[in-house]
Amino acid sequence: MLSIKNLHASVEGKEILKGINLEIKAGEVHAIMGPNGSGKSTLSQVLAGNEAFEVTEGEVTLNGQNLLELETEDRALEGIFLAFQYPVEIPGVSNLQFLRTAVNAARQHQGQAEMNAAEFMKLAKEVSKQVDLDPAFLKRGVNEGFSGGEKKRNEIMQALLLQPKLAILDETDSGLDIDALKVVSDGVNALRAEDRAILMVTHYQRLLDYIVPDYVHVLAGGRIIKSGGRELALELEERGYGWLGIKDEEAAAN
Amino acid sequence: MKSAPTLSSAFLKPAGESLPQPLLALRKERGKALVDMPLPTRKTENWKYSSRHLKLSDELANSLPAGGATTDAAAGGYRIVIRNGVVDASTSVLPQVEGLSVQRFADLTDEDAAELARSLDSTLDTRATQMARLNSARFEDGLLIRLKPDTVVDQPLFVIHEVTATAAGSAFPRIYVDAGRHSGMTLVEEFLSSGDESAMVDAVTEFTLADGARITGVRLVAEGQNIQHIGATGVRQLRSSRFESHCVGFGGPLRRHDLRVRLEGEGAECKLNGVVVTQDKQHYDNHTCIDHMVPNCNSEETYRNIAADESHAVFNGRIHIHKDAQKSNANMNNKNLLLSTGAEIDTKPELEIYADDVKCAHGATIGQLDDTSLFYLVSRGIARREASVLLTMAFINELVAQIPVEQVRNSANERLNQFFDDAFREA
């Protein structure tokens, strides 16, 4: 489904990704782990099409289509979804209006009729229950005044509504207490499907107890330096990143 | 040395002699005071950004004739059409409400006209509204709206100020609202135009609020691109009265509005909201001034400007807390959004505080659409253009939603959508 070959990317002239190679097939769940500053978030942002990052080399295809040639919104319409590490607060745009606009953009792209306000409200209420978000949040501004956990649940809610081909979860576990983590994980597990792939980016192993990946990759210094199965994550937890000869900046700072 | 330009004498020849004698006399007196009045220039502080947009060719000195067709206005309920500054009785529905009197200046008795003549201009700072003074020398008709004590009008009164610019010239609409104790009403003023010739509107509206009166003024400025608009609104508030102003303005060759509120009685409060959008080479200039004259008054002011293309928006917000006005509470907020690199916005909060126990807050920002928010929206498959419209609308949503008259809200939203269509058209 997703094929990344020798991907190099930089921000403000500084190279962050230095040759990423990754193949993800439909139905698979991949986890990318790595210390802070290794390029995990950059990879997510580059795949979603953030123009602040410049791709200098390499190629990325989604089901054979050159992803890097597509505008951000077209990537979303082709099935890329990024759950943000820091979802943006947008006062003045209601969550409901935002979600409906996004869902209708996808439906229009797929040749389906747009949903009217009443139809969408019904759907949104159902899905908000699935992530344990009070439907009252739908009326508020996008993420406005939401707690960290509520923002993450709102991200998963969007994924459930948009039904992407590839869901990229950027540090979706950060800032969550154990109850919220369970809710979010249940939402992500509900996304698992034969025709969908999930790419999780995380610093901690903890999330992987709830969303069990098929593959684990370690990203360091802008490259994937080790890949393995679920057991790789457990080993990382036990032995730290130092075991692989890389410095965890956060660990070093502590 | 070149002498400063002065007002052409052609502008001091009023038309319409059907006014009662005291008002004709007032007009004449005001006209005399304007002989050789220097026109504002770049060096005139309160016209610094707008003087070059003021184009007073002699043909604009003509009074536009009454007559012409009425364009679409978002009116409902009580509706009065003032065409080219003169009340059009045939298309107006004068309200029949106990305690409310709405009269044309021309229909006033000499006694009432004499009283009105003493009151006109009393709410304005004539030094700060030099161009609005021309209205007092030129008005040909007007509306005197009087509310008896405790009269609360059940629905808004719409005044449609329409200019039919089938020839070059000017119109000078005038309204005076005298609100008795504990009375209440909403006055909607819509400024519209038809015709293609260049024209000017110089409109003055004054409100006096007795103790406990609650008045809302809604102002929608949406004339054509051939119309220069100069407006002044003056408000005097006595004890425990409340005045709300909601202005929505669309740009033009020159749009200028001076809004002045004097809080003269303890416990008086005002809330002033304003939304301005400009595009192409349009110009819009809002000057507001709130005078806290006595203790324990509140003022709250929120203005938003959005400038696209090569347009220019100006906001000057003055708050003057006089020395006896202890426990004043004043809050002013002005945010501005530039949609293109060629657009310009100038904002100036001016606070003069002579009392020592006051709460006075002000904030002004100028920014662009936030890239992070834009990325978030487009990453959900929303087209960039639509995302930009959502974010721009978000900037003013709250103020539009607060407009207490549904017809004006709808009309404003329709015009705003048109503005966004143009402002975010494909390059």
Image (cartoon, helix red, strand yellow):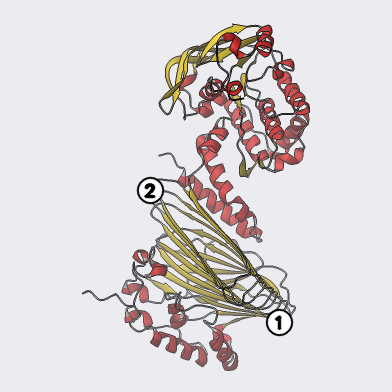
Report in which chain the residue with disc 2 lies.
B
Crowd rating for badge 1 (residues with CA inside 10 Å; few <14, some 14–19, many 20+): some
Q: Which residue is mark 2?
A: B342
User: In the image, what residue type sits under mark 1?
Assistant: Lys
Please identify the quadrant where the N terminus of chain A is shown: top right
Q: Residue at x 42, y 69 (%)?
A: B46
Element marked by disc 1: loop
Query: Mark 2 falls on what kind of element?
Result: loop
| Residue B324 x, y percent position in the rendering | 61, 77
Foreground residue among A125 and A248: A248
- Whole-percent x, y for residue B30 in the image: 44, 86
Chain letter, disc 1 residue:
B
Q: Is residue B259 visible?
A: yes
The disc at residue B242 is none
Q: Residues within 10 Å of mark 2 (few under 14, many from 20)?
A: some
Q: Quadrant of residue B206?
A: bottom right
Quadrant containing the C terminus of chain A is top right
| Up-down relation of residue A247 to residue A92 (above or below) | above
What's the residue type where badge 2 is placed?
A: Gly
Q: Position of residue B92 (x, y in %)?
A: 60, 73
Label 1 in the same subunit as label 2: yes
Q: Are marks 1 and 2 in contact (CB under 8 Å)?
A: no
- Residue A25 position within the rendered picture, expressed as x and y whole percent measured from the top left: 60, 9
| In-front residue for pair B313/B10 | B313
Please indicate whether residue A33 sits to the left or right of residue B368 in the image: right
Residue at left offset 56%, top offset 65%: B219
**Residue at label 1?**
B148
Q: Can you tell which quarter of the image residue B190 is in?
A: bottom right
Question: Which residue sits at x=41%, y=77%?
Answer: B63
Q: Nearer the viewer, residue A128 or B328?
A: B328
